[in-house]
Amino acid sequence: MAKKIQLVCMFFLLFSKSVCAQLNSSDVLYKTILEKDSLLFSVGFNNCDIAQFENLLSDELIFLHDKNGTSNKQQFLRDLKNGLCKDPAARQVKRILEKGSTKIYPLYKDGIIYGAVQDGTHLFYDNTENTPGIAKFSNIWQLENGKWKLAISSSYDHKLYSGDITPSSFDNDTEIENWLKRNNIKTLGLGIIEEGKLKQVKVYGELKEGITAPYNTVFNVASLAKKLTAMVTLKLVSLGKWKLDEPIFHYWTDPDVKDNPWHKKLTTRMILSHQTGFPNWRYLNRENKLNFEFEPGTKYQYSGELIEYLRKALEIKFKKS
């Protein structure tokens, strides 16, 4: 282990020979590394989701801490499970990046990127009156079989923090949990999406009494699917890739209505304005089959089936799901 540590120290001293200029925050690699950092800490560390560490830490990880010494992946996971995450329900310590402190540098070999250096400052706080802590860190991420893994991590210069560490509403678990209680909401899932990528996920509450909702809780999105499908459809229309008044049967016809000539009248405009003539859901019918309750375009009637109809047509035309 001592030999490995010597090699690590040499690497930190010499990496500048293969590192390029600091990346701009809009760079794809910068965003990728921050995304991995968020999964590792905002999801993994802050919520005791050990699976994030198992997935993102290199099997050859070397972790250096100026107070607690060095450890490999197995030791790090064991300490985490038996220490801070021994009782996730009572967990209080959270880690956040100091705003504006992150610097990321790409590492190349023969013009091909193989890793990245992430330098920054992180803060640790809990929900008690204890003074928050602050420390510098330097992480070496490397590509292993096409996947980013944390290979070397150092956390140093730990000290008490005297500044304001009031977390945002999204980071303030106590505030959110109190809000749930005040509004009698049993379970809540929150996510932050930036530029089409999921950056953070948090789940609060219980699946049922006494059973905490896990990070990977599956929620029924219900009619939210209508809004998402409508937005995608109208975006395609604005790009000239989809027509509001083109008959849907050119792409999709449900087997239950293929023998009814009214199916050839269905258009996207009728679907988005709830004029298809479909019932809400086919399972509400005695025959459990989709049917027309009136001629499309002549009346209005709310339906969940219609958005599924449109979704299938879109998937067939664009060969995506």
Image (spheres, rainbow, N blue to C red):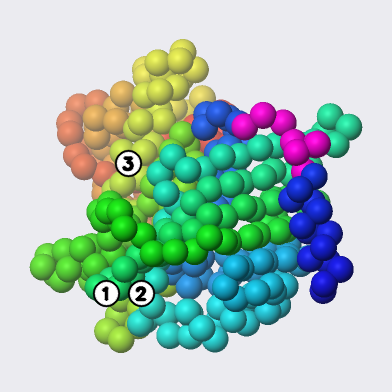
Residue under the point 72% across and 73% down: 72
Residue 298 in percent (x, y) is at: 20, 27
- The answer to whether the residues at label 1 and label 2 have Cβ atoms under 8 Å apart is yes
Q: Is 18 colored magenta in this rendering?
A: yes
Vertical position of residue 252 compared to residue 138: above or below? above
Q: Which is more N-terminal, label 1 or label 3?
A: 1
Seen at 34% across and 32% down, the residue is: 230
The residues tagged by marks 3 and 1 sit, at their Cα atoms, a distance apart of 43 Å
| Residue 275 tag number | none
Q: Secondary structure at mark 1?
A: loop
Q: Which region of the structure is painted magenta?
A: 15-22
- Which residue, given by chain and number where applicable, does mark 1 sit on? 128
Q: Is residue 246 visible?
A: no
Write the residue at 36% across / 60% down: 161
* Residue hosting label 3: 226
* Left or right for 130, reference 122: left
Q: Quadrant of the C terminus?
A: top right
Instruction: Report if residue 181 lies within the magenta region.
Output: no
Badge 3 local density, few (<14 within 10 Å), some, or many (20+)? some
Q: Amino acid at mark 1?
A: Thr
**Cα distance in 3D space between marks 1 and 2:** 8 Å
Which SS class for mark 3?
Answer: helix
Q: Secondary structure at mark 2?
A: loop
According to the picture, the residue beneath numbered tag 2 turns out to be 92
How packed mark 1 is, by other alpha carbons closer than 10 Å (few <14, some 14-19, many 20 or more), is: few
Q: Position of residue 300 (x, y in %)?
A: 17, 34
Q: In this rendering, which labeled residue sits more in front, label 1 or label 2?
A: 1
Eye-nearest disc, 3 or 1: 1
Give amino acid for label 3: Lys
